[in-house]
Image (cartoon, coloured by chain):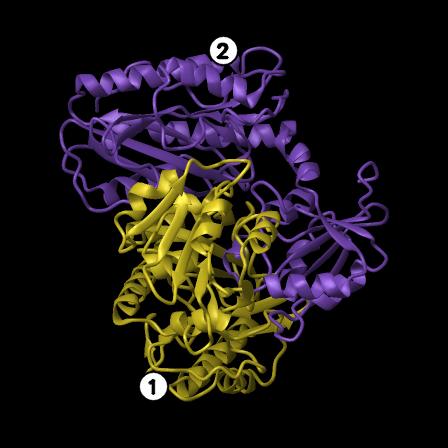
Chain colours: A yellow, B purple
C-alpha cells in the first residue's frame, strides 16, 4: 500500500472480506445487505457491517466493528463508510480482472461524491496476495480434494445405466457430504454418447444410456475452500472415439504436470497442454485457473496470461477438446506449484477411460 | 420501458439474467467471466456471453446470442456490448436497493465512456416484475417448501444430544437432498441454552447439550427457486425461558398471518408482528422479506418499507427476539399473499417448542 500510495483499501465482496478478516458466512446469499471492510495503511482495520453480523465478526481478529440496523433505506452503511474513509486521498477498490461491486452502484456513486479521496483499482495488490496460498490454506484444499476423490471412488456403486441425470447429481452430492465435504456449492456435468454438449448445465431427468460418457465436475468445500475437478466414466461400454479423446486429454494433463512449476508462466503451461491435444479446438477459453476461497481464481492458463507461477500457488490443469458438433470432453486435476514437479492434490485420474 | 423512456435494459447479475432469459447455471460461482443480457424496447433481446455458455443459452427463448472466447484480457465482452447498445440514449441498469454490479467496475466505466447513452437506475422496473410470482414459480416454491418440511419432520431421528453441530448440518443437508431438494445453497443455524448467539454462522464441532435450543434455517432449492424457513428444537428438555420465547414468536407469526394480505403494506405486517413480541429487541433489521430466485428478495418487512403487498407475492414471516446477552431466537414461515389470509407454503411450526 505504501509503495503504491494507497491510504486505504475498501472491500465489499465475500472473498476479500473473508480473506482479510476471517469472517465466513453463507449469509452473502442474501443480496439485501452490503458488508464492508476498510484496511488503512496505518491504524486498525475497520469492519462496517449490518448489526446481524456483529456477533460473528467479533470472533475474528477485527477489533473495530461498526454496525447499523440494516437494511436501512436512507443510508445502508454509506455514512459510516464516509466517516471511516475521512482523510484518505487514494482509496483502493478491486475494479479489475475478476472483480465485482457487491453494493448498489447508486450507493457507490454517493460514497464517491461524499468521500474526498479518489477510488483507484487495487486488484493487483489483492491478486498477488491471494494467488499464493499459506500452508494452512493448502492443507484445507488438499483435504477437500481427498474427500471429493473418495466420493468419486464410489462411482461404480453410485451411477449406472438407466439412472436419470438429476438422480446422478443428487447421489453424488450426498456422497460428497458423506465423504467429508462441508458443502457442495458447485456441481455440474453432462452425459452423452462419446462426449457431452456443455459443461455448465444443471441436470435434467434424461437417463444414462449404455455407451454414454458421464462427466461430473465438482467444487465441494471445506472451511470455505474449494476443490475443483472432474471425472469421466463410460457407462457400460466405452466407444473408441471416447477412449481416444480421453487418452488425448490425459496426455495433455501430463504435459501440464511436466510444465507447471515455479518460474513457468500460465501461458507456458497452456501452450504445453494445447500442443498435447494436437492444437484441438475448445470453447472453454482456458485450460485451468487458480483455486482457493473461490471456485476459480487468478491466474488463467491461457495464451495471453503471462503470470509467473510461484511456489505455493494452487491451480487446476483443465484441458478440453471439442470432439464433434455439440460434443466435448474435459479433464481436470488440482495441483500445488513447487520448485519441482507440482504436487497433485487430486488422486490422478486413470490413464484409460474407466467403464462402470 | 416506454413509460419511463428506457431504450434498453442491461443485466449482468445471475437472478436478472435468469429471470429474463431462463438461463440457469451454477457457473456463476466462477467470478472470472461476465455475462450480459440486453433487453431493448423494440427488437429482440440479445445475450452477450462467454462462448462456454452458448450451448446452454441456445436452449432458452433467446435467439440473438453473441459470444466471445472468454476470459479475454483486452476486451471481456465490452466491445460486443458497445455494439449492441449503439443508438440507445437511456439505458437501464439495476443500481438501487439489493443490486450489485457483477462485472469489473473498470469495465463498466469503459463501457459508459464508449456508449453514447446514459446509464440510469432501473431497479424499480425489475422489482415490480420479480416481486409478483407466476403460478409456475409459486408451484416450484411450494414444492421446495414441502420437501424441506419433510426433511425437518425427520428431526427427532436426525439430531440428538452429544452430536457435534457440524454433523447436525451434514445430516440435515443430506436429509434435504433425500427429501427432493436439488441443492442446499444456504444452511445456517445455531444451538445454545435458551437461545443462540447469532443466525448466520457456519457450524463448529460443539456437541449438542441437553437443554440446548437448536435452530436450523435453510434455503434449499428446486429448479433454482428457494424456500427460506427455520425450525427450533429443544434437545432433551425445554427450559421455561425458551418455551416462553418460542410461544411469543409463534404468536408474532400468527399476527403476521392475520395481517399479510393483498393491500396491506410490508410495514403493516412488520408492526403487527413487532407488537405481538411486546415490542421486543431484534438485531436482524426486519421481520421477513420476499423469496424466489434468491434467498431474499424485495420487499423487507420493516417499519419504513411501505411496499403494498399484492396477490401472488411470496414472502417470509420471520419475527425474532433478543432474549438476553448474546442470546436470540427466530421463527420463520413462507407464505403466498392472496386477497384473504395468506396461503402457508410451509407446514406451520407447532405452537409449543418441540422437544426431541
Query: Viewer-proximal residue, A326 or A185?
Result: A185
The reply, left or right, for residue A28 in relation to residue B190 is right
- Image-quadrant location for residue B20: top right
Which quadrant of the figure contains the C terminus of chain B? top left
Q: Residue at x 29, y 71 (%)?
A: A134
Is residue A353 at least partly visible in the picture?
A: no
Q: Chain of mark 2?
A: B
Work out how far the residue at label 1 is from the one at label 2, CA to CA, in angstroms: 67 Å
- Image-quadrant location for residue A284: bottom right
Query: Viewer-proximal residue, A125 or B208?
Result: A125
Q: Residue at x 48, y 78 (%)?
A: A247
Q: Residue at x 65, y 49 (%)?
A: B17
- From the image, tell me which residue sits under label 2: B258
Which quadrant of the figure contains the N terminus of chain B? top right
Regarding mark 1 in the picture, which secondary structure is present there? loop
Q: Callout 2: few (<14), some (14-19), or many (20+) C-alpha neighbours within 10 Å?
A: some
Q: Callout 1: few (<14), some (14-19), or many (20+) C-alpha neighbours within 10 Å?
A: some
Q: Residue at x 15, y 25 (%)?
A: B236
- From the image, tell me which residue sits under label 1: A341
- From the viewer's perspective, is residue B150 above or below residue A356? above
Q: Position of residue B81 (x, y in %)?
A: 74, 62
Asked whether the residues under marks 1 and 2 belong to the same chain, the reply is no
Label 2 near label 1: C-beta < 8 Å? no
The reply, left or right, for residue A81 in relation to residue A146 is right
Q: Position of residue B294 (x, y in %)?
A: 53, 40
Q: Position of residue B255 (x, y in %)?
A: 44, 13
Q: Which disc, if any, is residue B54?
A: none
For the residues carrying marks 1 and 2, which lies nearer the camera in this image? 2
The reply, left or right, for residue B76 in relation to residue A342 is right
Amino acid at each position: 500500500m505504501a509503495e503504491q500510495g494507497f491510504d486505504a483499501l475498501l472491500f465489499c465482496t465475500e472473498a476479500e472480506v473473508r480473506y482479510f478478516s476471517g469472517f465466513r458466512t453463507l449469509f452473502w446469499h442474501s443480496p439485501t445487505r452490503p458488508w464492508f471492510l476498510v484496511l488503512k495503511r496505518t491504524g486498525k482495520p475497520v469492519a462496517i457491517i449490518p448489526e446481524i453480523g456483529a456477533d460473528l465478526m467479533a470472533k475474528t481478529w477485527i477489533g473495530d466493528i461498526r454496525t447499523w440496523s440494516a437494511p436501512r433505506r436512507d443510508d445502508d452503511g454509506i455514512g459510516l463508510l464516509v466517516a471511516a474513509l475521512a482523510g484518505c486521498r487514494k482509496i483502493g477498490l478491486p475494479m479489475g480482472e475478476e472483480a465485482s461491486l457487491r453494493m448498489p452502484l447508486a450507493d457507490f456513486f454517493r460514497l464517491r461524491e461524499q468521500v474526498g479521496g479518489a477510488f483507484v483499482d487495487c486488484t493487483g495488490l489483492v491478486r498477488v496476495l491471494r494467488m499464493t496460498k499459506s500452508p494452512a490454506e493448502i492443507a484445507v484444499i488438499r483435504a477437500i480434494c481427498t474427500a471429493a476423490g473418495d466420493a468419486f471412488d464410489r462411482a461404480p456403486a453410485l451411477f449406472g445405466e438407466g439412472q436419470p441425470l438429476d438422480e446422478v447429481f443428487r447421489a453424488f452430492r450426498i456422497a460428497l457430504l458423506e465423504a467429508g465435504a462441508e458443502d457442495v456449492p458447485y456441481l455440474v456435468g453432462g452425459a452423452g454418447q462419446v462426449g457431452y454438449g456443455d459443461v455448465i448445465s444443471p441436470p435434467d431427468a434424461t437417463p444414462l444410456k449404455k455407451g454414454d460418457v458421464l462427466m461430473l465436475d465438482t467444487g465441494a468445500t471445506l472451511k470455505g475452500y474449494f476443490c475443483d475437478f472432474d471425472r469421466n466414466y463410460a457407462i457400460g461400454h466405452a466407444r473408441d472415439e471416447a477412449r481416444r479423446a480421453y487418452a488425448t486429454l490425459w496426455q495433455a494433463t501430463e504435459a501440464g504436470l511436466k510444465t507447471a512449476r515455479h518460474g513457468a508462466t500460465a501461458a507456458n503451461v497452456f501452450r504445453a497442454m494445447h500442443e498435447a491435444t494436437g492444437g484441438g479446438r475448445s470453447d472453454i477459453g482456458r485450460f485451468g485457473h487458480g483455486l482457493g476461497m473461490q471456485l476459480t481464481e487468478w491466474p488463467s492458463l491461457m495464451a495471453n496470461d503471462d503470470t509467473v507461477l510461484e511456489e505455493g500457488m494452487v491451480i487446476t490443469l483443465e484441458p478440453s477438446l471439442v470432439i464433434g458438433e455439440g460434443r466435448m470432453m474435459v479433464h481436470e486435476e488440482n495441483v500445488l506449484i513447487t520448485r519441482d514437479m507440482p504436487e497433485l492434490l487430486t488422486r490422478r485420474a486413470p490413464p484409460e477411460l474407466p467403464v462402470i
